[in-house]
Image: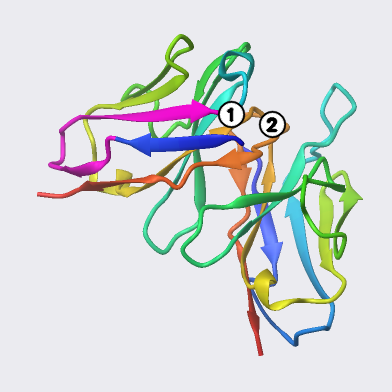
């Protein structure tokens, strides 16, 4: 059974940093691209980043501030978020896949507020 | 960026009756590899999204056959042949033909 467990969310002040983690199990993690998608409270879905064999891609809204990485030995995906803004407040989902986003974690909530 | 536009944004439905959602993209979703990377996802209240349909019309594992997808190019449709209570939630179309991936605004399906 595919499982994706996000962690690392919390309350942070504007300009602060956080690192999200996503522990994956139930599939050959190193063989798959992984994606971050976020959802602001009461809003729709917004793609954030994808890491895979083609490279790492970012939404313009986070480029230069967020960094996606992975540790295949630990089956873990990361999202390092710097210079956080109020508009980054959202539930961040870890998702398996590149074009086919087939499994989603439960999400971890990031709140940026003073 | 490819803009995804869904209609309607809200769809009150009667259980047992059909429902349909449209999704239009601002440019063709046909990839150079010949595939069209248009997916449909359902987000039930309080839950993460789940994949229903990928590449226009392929049902994901475990998805009931009352869900079907169709379309080509820039116009796509999700149909539910007979709505059941568990189908209530917000439906999103998503394109993965190019970066950035983009989603439709979401269509809220609720029981009348």
Q: In this figure, which residue is indicated by the disc labeled 1?
A: A26
User: Residues in magenta?
Assistant: A8-26
Q: Is residue A114 above or below residue B99?
A: below
User: Does residue A16 appear left or right of residue B55 in this picture?
Assistant: left
Q: Position of residue A87 (x, y in %)?
A: 30, 48
The residue that appears at 63% across and 29% down in the rendered structure is A97
Q: Is residue A45 above or below residue B78?
A: above
- Decide which of tag 1 and tag 2 comes sooner along the chain: 1
> Furthest residue to the bottom?
B112
Q: Are marks 1 and 2 on the same chain?
A: yes
Q: Is residue B19 magenta?
A: no
The residue that appears at 62% across and 51% down in the rendered structure is B50
Host chain of mark 2: A
Q: Position of residue A71 (x, y in %)?
A: 43, 12
The residue that appears at 64% across and 37% down in the rendered structure is A101
How many other residues sit within 10 Å of disc 1, few (<14), some (14-19) or many (≥20)?
few
User: Does residue B57 appear left or right of residue A9 in this picture?
Assistant: right
């Amino acid at each position: 059974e595919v499982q994706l467990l996000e962690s690392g969310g919390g309350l942070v002040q504007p300009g602060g940093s956080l690192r999200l983690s996503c522990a994956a199990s139930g599939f050959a993690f190193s063989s798959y691209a992984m994606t971050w998608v976020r959802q602001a409270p009461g809003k729709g879905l917004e793609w954030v980043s994808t890491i895979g064999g083609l490279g790492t891609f970012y939404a313009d809204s986070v480029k230069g501030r967020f960094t996606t990485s992975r540790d295949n030995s630990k089956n873990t995906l990361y999202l390092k978020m710097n210079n956080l803004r109020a508009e980054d407040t959202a539930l961040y989902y870890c998702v398996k896949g590149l074009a086919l986003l087939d499994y989603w974690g439960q999400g971890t909530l990031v709140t940026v507020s003073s | 960026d490819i803009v995804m536009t869904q209609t309607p944004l809200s769809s009150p439905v009667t259980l047992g009756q059909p429902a349909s959602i449209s999704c239009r993209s601002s440019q063709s979703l046909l990839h150079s590899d010949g595939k069209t990377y248009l997916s449909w996802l359902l987000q039930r209240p309080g839950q993460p999204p789940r994949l229903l349909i990928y590449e226009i019309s392929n049902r994901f594992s475990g998805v009931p056959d009352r869900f079907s997808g169709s379309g080509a190019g820039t116009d796509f449709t999700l149909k539910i042949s007979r709505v059941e209570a568990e189908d209530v939630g917000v439906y999103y179309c998503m394109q993965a033909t190019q970066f950035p991936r983009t989603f439709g605004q979401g269509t809220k399906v609720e029981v009348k």
